[in-house]
Amino acid sequence: MISSIFLPLAFAVCQVSSSPIHQRRALSQNDIIGLQLAGYLENLELSLYTGGCEGFTDVEWIAAGFPSTFQQDICAIAEQQQNQTGFIASSLESNGISAPQACSYNLSYDSPTSFVLRANQITSISLGFYLGSLNDFSPALQTVAASILSVEARHDAIVRNGMGASPFPTNLDVPLSSVWAYSLAQNYISSCPQHLPIDLLPPLSFNGMSGSSLSFG
């Protein structure tokens, strides 16, 4: 019985690992910009979750009111962010395109609670980007983007649940265009070795938690 359950899963994993994104293929301009922004946001999340994993002890997490397994969850998210970042970078580089480099970040947290609030904001940006940009990718990349989107949603649910908020606060998630996602990410960037060819809106910020969902200002 167990083997019959895991066989389809193993097949699905094999299918993903042989995805066309790993092959050298012509990328549209939308594909290139979308993957570059995905890498840009994944670098931001990687820095955030690595800091959260390494910056606080189990004792500090528990003292702040988080579940005993929460640090383990944050470290697992950091590892997945590392894999996603490498995946996107190799996808660009295999097509002769430089992957975005990590920026210097201004994440401004000094406690488990302030870290989780920051994680909620930043993960929401990535989640909104993948949702809002899904149709901008070519068909071969849409499945890949959707698979990352579903993982981002799980990360967001873990973060929200850990902070005592609903892991599923709304019936529909809010999509973000590339312009909105890139502009919102600037709140956490001190300096960057390169800028993406995406327009920037006037400064935007999160207003914070509003009921069970985030609002923007």
Image (tube, grey):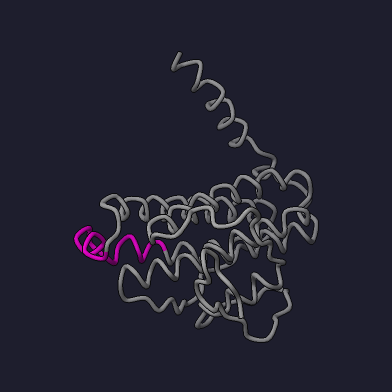
Q: Which residue reaches farthest top?
A: 1
Q: Which residue reaches farthest left?
A: 59
Tell me: 152 left or right of 61: right
Relative depth, front residue between 201 and 117: 117
Q: Is residue 199 magenta?
A: no
- Determine the residue positioned at 63% across, 53% down: 171
Image mark count: 0
Relative depth, front residue between 168 and 88: 168
Which corner quadrant of the image does residue 132 belong to?
bottom right
- Looking at the rendered image, the quarter that the C terminus falls into is bottom right
- Looking at the rendered image, the quarter that the N terminus falls into is top left
> At which x and y percent is residue 114?
37, 73
Which corner quadrant of the image does residue 65 belong to?
bottom left
- Determine the residue positioned at 23% across, 59% down: 62
Q: Which residue reaches farthest front?
A: 211
| Predominant SS along the magenta part | helix
- Determine the residue positioned at 59% across, 30% down: 12
Which corner quadrant of the image does residue 41 belong to?
bottom right
Q: Is residue 202 above or below residue 4?
A: below
Q: Is residue 61 above or below residue 104?
A: above
> At which x and y percent is residue 193?
56, 77
> At which x and y percent is residue 108?
40, 79
Q: Is residue 62 magenta?
A: yes
The residues colored magenta run: 49-64
Tell me: 50 left or right of 85: left
> At which x and y percent is residue 6?
49, 23
Tell me: 151 left or right of 196: left
Q: Is residue 147 above or below residue 53?
A: above
Relative depth, front residue between 100 and 189: 189
- Determine the residue positioned at 59% across, 54% down: 88
